[in-house]
Amino acid sequence: MQDLFFGYGIAHTILLLAFVIGTGLYLGRFKVKGISLGSTWILFMGILMGHLGFQADLDVLHFVKEFGLILFVFSIGLQVGPGFFHSFKQGGVKMNLLAVMNILLAVAVTYAISALSGEDLKTMVGVMSGAVTNTPGLGAAQQTFIDVSVAGGSSTLAAGEASEQLASAYAVAYPIGVVGVILVIVLMKAIFKIDHKKELELLEAQADTTEKARRMHVEVDNPAIFGKKLTDVLQPFGGDFVVSRVMKGDEILFPSSDLVLEEGDKLLIVTSQGEVDRIRILFGKEVPMHVQDWVVKDHHMVTRRIVVTQPKLTGKTLKELMFRSVYGVSVTRVVRAGVELVASKDLYLQMGDALVCVGTEKNIEQVAQKVGNSSEALNKPNLVPIFMGIVVGVIFGSIPLKFPGIPQAIKLGLAGGPLIIAILLGHWGPKFKITTYTTASANLMIREIGISLFLAAVGIGAGGEFWSSIVGGGYWWILYGACITLIPLIITFVVARAVCKLNFYQICGLISGSCTNPPVLAFSQGMYGSDYTSVNYATVYPLSMFMRVLVAQLLILFAMA
């Protein structure tokens, strides 16, 4: 039993990880003036246990850290994938420019501290990697340091031992990187007097300008289409919209293929904002009606939401399924991962999609049987795409990317690769008949397990040398790390809020993503109660990860030139 509690083996490592995670999560429940560090307590508990002398198997610890991070970012990627490219078009360029600004500011502060204090620039790269919580950047910097040292005549062993200075600096600065970012978010929220509940309401009420479904009530007053069949009008027009119902006088009709349009007919159309002007030109002006007007007058049609639970329908388009022509049912909207999409004929379906259908009760029931509409079927996890996606992500993240003038190849690493593949799977999976659906609770479970394992492993690994590094002069690294964390983030927050007018949740995602900081993402989601930050986190994370790794290597090359 002594080996179990105070040993070094596998059982002891598992016991230690479980204790750190359980205790950390329990402490995360407590709030001081409404503020809680949440799962970040796991990191501090890990550091404490490491400092008290509890050790873990290093190979297991390294595996747990990397695998936990992969699970976390992969679940984030699958969650945000369906709306990622829409979000990127909405403001991704601006977000990524702000992220790059934050990264370059951190580099400038790092170099300035080295120049003013006389601290070795190579050591400052370790401090910077910890201050921005970027483990891949540390690994890349260490490898570059070893490669250059060996090329200069040093032995591999000596070069490896010398590179541990970077790891010590990283371990000392890492907690500051986590707490500092959280501190910036809390302080800036107070300084700008941000009400996060109102910010959330603004996000939820904000009408998307490209893809999100929008209802239009249009009166037919274009003489060019009087007396023409609806199908003859729609066929050459194309576009991304659905005619849900037609009102002729007091009668509401289902838009069948042989329905003839007449002057004064009113149409209920579901479309995207980008098609509004074209629809007005084709049919006529919008009229002041409410969706309730159609419900009250429609005695035959009902509106129901049914869920696709048949895996074989993944990758099928609405045109292929012919709901309107075969069943007399119109699909007006598709809700995927909380995002409303226009039910265009070329839209690929995937398991878990909710279809908003209009038709008779009997006909909708037939469609429901075809698509499944079984809540039990959604409870079964689809693990094959997840693990095969991780396989592809790890391979993709390990591909060396070479650039002219840089001797060391750049890699996206075990975090960046899986995240990008998960985003692509979430977005393009249905087109290639890949079922990637997981329930919200299952996704959250994977995410929380991943971040908990990651934080526990990082804390335990850093705890052993944490205090000795500080006593040995590393206390200056805390101050340096705080400067590298706080100065760029404060400037970025001010510019994002005051100049770019970004929403608070967008800024939280921007900051945590540009710092490649999963603990802060978990904090902002838990503290302020929204997953909106995840989309923005994923929007800037890939480029930020690449830039963090790149600048770390460039600084090492510059320091050793």
Image (spheres, grey):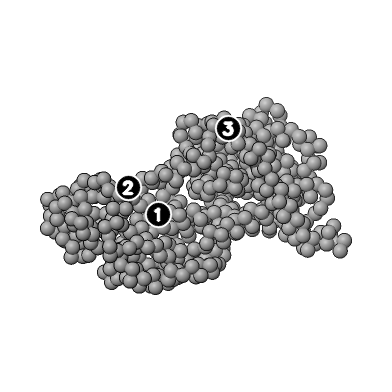
Give the label on residue 340, or none: 1
Asked if residue 253 lies left or right of residue 385, the reply is left
Q: Quadrant of residue 516?
A: top right
Can you identify the residue that label 2 sits on?
A: 273
Dot 2 amino acid type: Gln
Q: Residue at x 67, y 36 (%)?
A: 481
Dot 1 amino acid type: Glu
Mark 2 or mark 3: which is in front?
3
Q: How many marks?
A: 3
Along the polypeptide, which appears first: circle 3 or circle 1?
A: 3
Asked if residue 268 lies left or right of residue 516, the reply is left
Reply above or below: 6 against 506: below
Taking depth in this image into account, of 352 and 250 the one nearest to the observer is: 250
Q: Residue at x 83, y 62 (%)?
A: 4
Q: CA distance from mark 2 to mark 3?
A: 35 Å
Q: Position of residue 448 (x, y in %)?
A: 62, 55
Name the quarter where the C terminus is drawn. Answer: top right
Can you identify the residue that label 3 sits on?
A: 190
Residue 85 visible in this rendered orientation of the protein: yes
